[in-house]
Amino acid sequence: MKLVQILFACGFAMAGGEARRKIGQGAVKVNGVHVLEADHFLGAGVHEVTMGRLAPVTVVIHPAQATVIFSDKSAITVGG
């Protein structure tokens, strides 16, 4: 699943363009590593995504969908 989609789904960005801009500025980390490519793809597995000083989210990606788990343990499903 594209990182841009995850940022939009979890509320870190209000639009795809904003998500791409934040990635390009180096504000986004996946599993503690800065991501600078706007077309970054997250494969199946569990990933921690952070942006700036916002609380991190845990993203669980399955082949057909992703589940975003927020710090308060609420969750949303993306795709599928």
Image: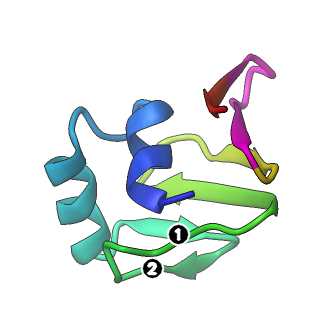
Residue of label 1? 29
Mark 1 lies on a secondary structure that is strand
Please tell me which residue lies in front, 63 or 41: 63
62 with respect to 24 (left or right)? right
Q: Residue 48 carries which label?
A: none
Q: State which region is magenta.
A: 64-76
- Which badge, 1 or 2, is on the more N-terminal residue? 1
Residue beneath the point at 24% across and 62% down:
20
Query: Which of the image's four quarters has the C terminus?
Result: top right
Mark 2 lies on a secondary structure that is loop
* Contact, mark 1 vs mark 2 (Cβ under 8 Å): yes
Please tell me which residue lies in front, 30 or 4: 4
Residue 74 drawn at (x, y percent): 74, 17
Please, what is the three-letter code of the amino acid marked with disc 1?
Lys
Residue beneath the point at 52% across and 69% down:
29
Crowd rating for badge 2 (residues with CA inside 10 Å; few <14, some 14–19, many 20+): some
Crowd rating for badge 1 (residues with CA inside 10 Å; few <14, some 14–19, many 20+): some
Please, what is the three-letter code of the amino acid marked with disc 2?
Val
Tell me, yes or no, whether the highlighted magenta stretch contains residue 71. Answer: yes
61 with respect to 19 (left or right)? right
Residue 33 drawn at (x, y percent): 59, 81
Residue beneath the point at 54% across and 56% down:
50
Residue of label 2? 35
Query: Which of the image's four quarters has the N terminus?
Result: bottom right
Residue 65, located in which quarter of the rendered image? top right
| Marks 1 and 2, how far apart at CA | 6 Å
Tell me, yes or no, whether the highlighted magenta stretch contains residue 6. Answer: no
Residue 70 drawn at (x, y percent): 69, 30
Residue beneath the point at 31% across and 73% down:
38
